[in-house]
Image (spheres, rainbow, N blue to C red):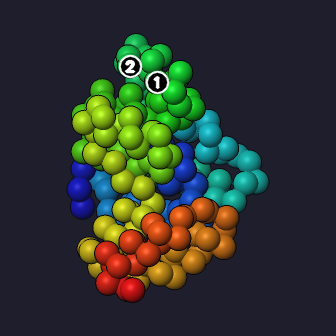
Amino acid sequence: MSEAVVADTGPLIALARIGRLDLLRRLYERVTVPPAVEFELAIGSDRPGARVLEGALEAGWIRVDVIPDGAGVQDLFMLLGQGEAEAIALAEQRQAPLLLIDDARGRRIARSRGIPVAGVAGVLLAAKGRQEVEAVAPILRLLSDAGYRLAPRLMEKVLAAAGEE
């Protein structure tokens, strides 16, 4: 199990909706989110995955962490949504070993700031690499069926990297 990571909303909701949020718990010591991401998770609503996410927050393996003095967020608000901006700023402030984020612009900005990033596809590949899942293809299908959009080229790349061409 590796250290704590910071997460944006997208990967958390995607995995919770298909009942695979457990992969994050198996792969990472803890998942930290900023307040804006906690708000976007719609805890207490009837949205798919909200109850699972609420349970993870109550169990303490997903934690909310405030960005010190809002440092580094204001310039990001002009380019990104609040959740992405706060997640990037928190990862930067906490020197997180990884930021879980799927938004393409957010990923580019995080990388330009020296923050390592991975999305849901990266989580699935890490899970397969650590033998937490037998195959990624069925999980990709579940994500697709749940409305999670993955470009066909990205799916091909992920399946190739997983040895499931």
Residue bearing mark 1: 76
Residue located at (39% from left, 72% from top): 158
Toward the viewer: 144 or 64? Answer: 144
Q: Secondary structure at mark 1?
A: helix
Determine if residue 31 is in view. Answer: no
Residue located at (38% from left, 63% from top): 123
125 lies above or below 58: below
Residue bearing mark 2: 72
Residue located at (61% from left, 62% from top): 148
Determine if residue 69 is in view. Answer: yes
Q: Where residue 6 appears, x then y in whole percent? A: 38, 42
Do the numbered discs 2 and 1 sit on residues whose CB atoms are within 8 Å? Answer: yes
- The type of residue carrying mark 2 is Gly
Mark 1 Cα shell of 10 Å, populated few (<14), some (14-19), many (≥20): some
Q: Where residue 102 appears, x then y in whole percent? A: 48, 51
Q: Quadrant of the C terminus?
A: bottom left
